[in-house]
Image (spheres, helix red, strand yellow):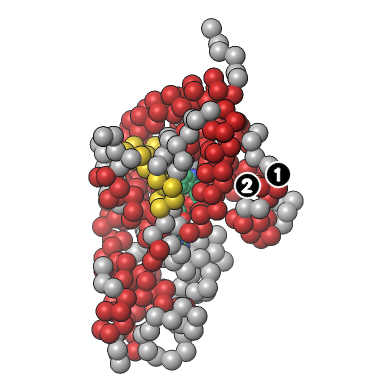
Amino acid sequence: MARPRVFSGIQPTADSFHLGNYLGALRQWVPMQETHDAFYCVVDLHALTVSPEPAQLRARTRVAAAQLFACGLDPERSTVFVQSHVREHTELTWILLCLTGMGEAARMTQFKDKAAKYGESAAGVGLFTYPMLMAADILLYQADQVPVGADQKQHLELTRDLAQRFNHRFGDTFTMPEPFIPKEVEKITDLQDPTAKMSKSSSSPQGILDVLEQPGPLRKKIMRAVTDTGSEVLFDETNKPGISNLLRIQAALTGTPIPELVARYEGQGYGTFKKDVAEAVVETFSPIRERTEKLLSDETELDRLLAIGAERAAAVARETMAVVRERVGFLPKL
Ligand code: TYM
């Protein structure tokens, strides 16, 4: 029997991925390449919505791809590619846009948050239509599963609605994708503001742990993470959001259940615990950083791997689009 298909994407909008990306998404991508037919995409079209400088976008796209391979994605087993290399993404987006209601798009909380942050008029139409581009990514590959963090849940629901609408109107075409959101790490929070999501657009770099950061700054940020009143290491999201976030991180990185960690640090205070969290983060990130640097030192080879990924992805995308074109009533070109 054919393996189920997995698709996921990540934006090249920073010089490094962060711990939220890593635990919420990337860490699930690696084992899934053993059990699924895996497609992973650096979504540079999405990144255009924040108006990057061309040279910066190009550099960050390579850094993003290098980090994906450095995290353990194997170009033999996974199709790793850059979104703009496969033209069908934009074509399917247009068709999905024509099936989306204004009200439906306006309800997307990520858009509302960003529009509130930058002002409604500064937020471009690209940002407004961002979720439909994401839906096109997923539906083009007939993905069964989509591993993402909790912040993408609403976009996945929209994707399912659009798939269902298309199938209902034009006949069965798209696979219904299921979100795969790992409960314990679905939302890693900011070290300086433990009620907010760790995010590239966060106001202070002190709150973010970057995958490519050196051990020194990583340790410092963790030791200075905002903690809560009291001194006991306890999991209590309401009263101790800072310590609870660190407990989730430590549990995920070391594979130790939270209750076991709580028992281990009983009577030891925050300092010892934070030091251990820092070690776990450094141990995880250092080899990824080193592999990323190595991959970036040979851009020709990196670009070659991405070209192979794009070829494989385009073959699937073309097949889907041939059906979609026929279904919506486009005249075949002789
Ligand atoms: P992006 O680039 O913002 O983030 C990449 C992945 O990281 C997850 N994530 C988090 N998980 C837990 N805690 C956090 N603090 C945290 N911050 C980020 C995100 O949920 C995401 O899974 N729209 C997507 C990119 C995309 C995509 C797709 C994803 C485009 N097309 C198709 C899946 C399928 C995004 O902005 O991710």
Residue in front for this viewpoint, 281 or 111 = 111
What x and y, as percent, mark residue 160? Answer: 52, 44
**Residue 249 appears anywhere in the view:** yes
Going from N to C along the chain, the mark reached first, 2 or 1, is 1
What x and y, as percent, mark residue 273? Answer: 32, 81
Task: Check contact, mark 2 vs mark 1: CB within 8 A.
Answer: no
Give the residue pinned by disc 2.
127
Check the image and report above or below for 181 versus 11: below
Place residue 268 in its image quadrant: bottom left
Q: Name the quadrant of the N terminus.
A: top left
CA separation in Å, label 2 and label 1: 13 Å
What x and y, as percent, mark residue 141? Answer: 43, 34
Q: Residue at x 44, y 50 (%)?
A: 179
Check the image and report above or below for 275 versus 168: below
Circle 2: element type: helix
Disc on res. 102:
1
Disc on res. 8:
none
Q: Residues within 10 Å of mark 2 (few under 14, many from 20)?
A: some
Report whether 199 appears left or right of 222. Answer: right
Check disc 2 and give the amino acid type. Answer: Leu
Residue in front for this viewpoint, 331 or 292 = 331
Q: Residue at x 29, y 55 (%)?
A: 288
Place residue 94 in its image quadrant: top right
Check the image and report above or below for 118 versus 172: below
Check disc 1 and give the amino acid type. Answer: Met
Circle 1: element type: helix
